[in-house]
Amino acid sequence: MTAIETTPSESSLSKVEHGTVKPTIVVATDGSAASAAAFKAASLIAGINDLNIRVVAVLEPLQIPAAIPHAILNFEGSDSTRIKQFVADVQSQIEKCKSQSAEWVIEPRVGIPAAEISQAAREHSAGLVIVGASRHGLFERLIGEETAARVAQLGDTPLLVAATGLERLPHRVVIAMDLDPSQLGDLRSVLSMFGPAASVTCVHVQRREDFPGSDSPAFARAYESAVTEAFDVVKEEISGVPGMRADLIRLHGDPATELLRYCDFAKAELLVLGLRRHYGLRRLLGGGVALNVLRGATCSVLIVPESAPLAPSGDAISRGKDTTLTSYVPDMWPSQLKQFTERNAGRRATLEVNGPDIGAFVEVAELPFIGADYDHRDGRVEILLGDFIGSDRHFSRSIPSPDSVSVLRGSDMKDDVLCISYGDGQTLLTFTT
């Protein structure tokens, strides 16, 4: 059955808590032909899961020329006519491929696609959002790769970008694995929706580093150890899904290029990316990397958000919880960084740089933290790492024109991360636990 709902309904979260409804997935469409892949994916997933399907049909508002007097326009009547025709077109698309085992409800919305899709996913506590991939350029469609990336950034729900020509659930799965496995969120729950896969490969792409010590045996050993530990965590998570077993592939080079090349070589049907967050700033495997992957992928892409922390219990609150201390006042930074240095000098740390142009890459790993300071004369934050004595291993980073200095402190009251934000980028100093 396909129902039509013209106003947002009561959030399904409260209903799920009372056990009166099945889990929900949101399928987003703009009525274009690319949406057929999203409908097909939803039908296949619903075929092996007991689900409700919410079809969020997003219609962009009319662009009214400023020269036309508002008094002669009938906005409500115009939108009403457009919505009726739009819903009829979407319903015709759905009937061609929808699963008879799931309830499909059409929810028309007028607005910006990414914002409306993200809002619908929150309202219905969706377990998955599905959009169709398009290769026709921004001018010819509303919901495509750029909108998909924006939906992932705005929301906390796993996002599936279904490839054109999708005919079956994926048998060959590639998982892009970072050094921090938490960026893959609740991978087990998401993958279980797709059923067993014949092949699951974790692919880690190591950027070609160029900094003092990057070619040292010590750095190579530390990096190899970090990759192995991350894979062990991901492998255990995947093993909880019946019929899935993971292998590891190591590659070197540009992450987006190497991931796409490997997916083509392995004839992958699904590429899984992780969504990471730092202090409210969000990035997809390095910001521009994920968008390049979405633009270039010929297979379906699943973006999984980093696991959100559970609400603390009363005991946990009494013991303390993670806190972020952020300062936007340069006069406070020298004192803040001096105290940070006094608390953490000697602890081993990794320095990572993030930005939309360069993505995210590790500049140095597993070196002792020596100190951090802010120079008023040059307007720079200086970070120094290395061995205190008996070694030439030293690394310094100078950060001009910072906007803010943030310190993430864990529930044990130890500093976990120092974040220096500037423009549209950030530098992260993360301590080894």
Image (tube, rainbow, N blue to C red):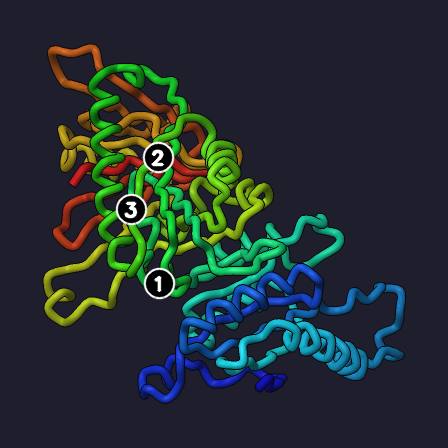
Q: Secondary structure at mark 3?
A: helix
Q: What is the x, y in percent for residue 35?
A: 64, 63
- Pair 3/2: label in front: 2
| Picture coordinates of residue 171, whole percent (x, y) | 43, 53
> Is 107 situated left or right of 428 in this image?
right
Residue at figure coordinates x 57%, y 57% from the top left:
166
Amino acid beneath label 3: Pro
Q: Are marks 3 and 2 in contact (CB under 8 Å)?
A: no
Is any atom of residue 424 visible in this view?
A: no
Q: Which comes sooner in the sequence, label 3 or label 2?
A: 3
Q: Nearer the viewer, residue 221 or 211?
A: 221
**Element type at marker 1?**
helix
Q: Which residue is mark 3?
A: 181
| Amino acid type, callout 2 | Ile
Mark 1 or 3: the one toward you: 1
SS type, badge 2: strand
In this figure, what is the number of numbered marks? 3
Q: Quadrant of residue 314?
A: bottom left
Circle on res. 192: 1
Q: Is residue 323 left or right of residue 379?
A: left
Residue type of the residue flagged with mark 1 = Ser
Residue where numbered disc 2 is placed: 249
The CA distance from mark 2 to mark 1 is 22 Å
Q: Which quarter of the rendered picture does the N terminus lie within?
A: bottom right
Label annotation for residue 85? none
> Where in the figure is residue 190, as x and y percent of width and height?
37, 61
Q: CA distance from mark 3 to mark 2?
A: 15 Å
| Up/down of 136 relative to 79, above or below | above
Neighbours of disc 2 within 10 Å: few (<14), some (14-19), many (20+)? few
- Say whether disc 2 or disc 1 marks the residue closer to the N-terminus: 1
Residue located farthest toward the front when viewing the structure as drawn: 198
